[in-house]
Image (cartoon, helix red, strand yellow):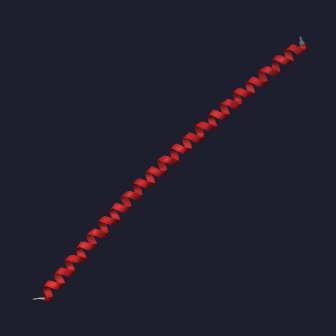
Amino acid sequence: MFLEHITVSIIHLNSASRISEMRCHMACCSLKMTKAHNNGRMAFEFGRHLNDFVFRLVLFCSVNLINIIIDFIDHLYSGFK
């Protein structure tokens, strides 16, 4: 009777340990998935901000280039007067 009780206790401990390992594994997988999702979201946000920055930079350069061309044409035109 005593040995049966020890055997049953060991089986319960073993199954509890497996359940605990499984929960730990599931939590770890969940954490990895959350981290990957957050990394993906951060990469998307960085890409969006980079895209916005590049768009503003190109727009700024274009406006400045147009202003330089207009000033150059105005300078040439005033030279012919």
49 relative position to 38: left or right: left
Count of marks placed on residues = 0
Report the front residue among 1 and 79: 79
| Residue, far left | 81
Q: Position of residue 26 (x, y in %)?
A: 63, 33
Residue in the picture at 77% in, 20% down: 12
19 relative position to 64: left or right: right
Q: Position of residue 15 (x, y in %)?
A: 74, 23
Q: Quadrant of the C terminus?
A: bottom left
Residue in the picture at 55% in, 41% down: 34
Residue in the picture at 56% in, 40% down: 33
Image quarter for residue 80?
A: bottom left
Image quarter for residue 55?
A: bottom left
| Residue, far right | 2
| Residue, far top | 1
Measured along the vertical axis of the image, is residue 68 above or below residue 50? Answer: below
Report the front residue among 33 and 13: 33
Q: Position of residue 24 (x, y in %)?
A: 67, 34
Measured along the vertical axis of the image, is residue 30 above or below residue 39? Answer: above
54 relative position to 24: left or right: left
76 relative position to 11: left or right: left
Measured along the vertical axis of the image, is residue 61 above or below residue 41? Answer: below
Image quarter for residue 51?
A: bottom left
Q: Position of residue 31 (x, y in %)?
A: 59, 40
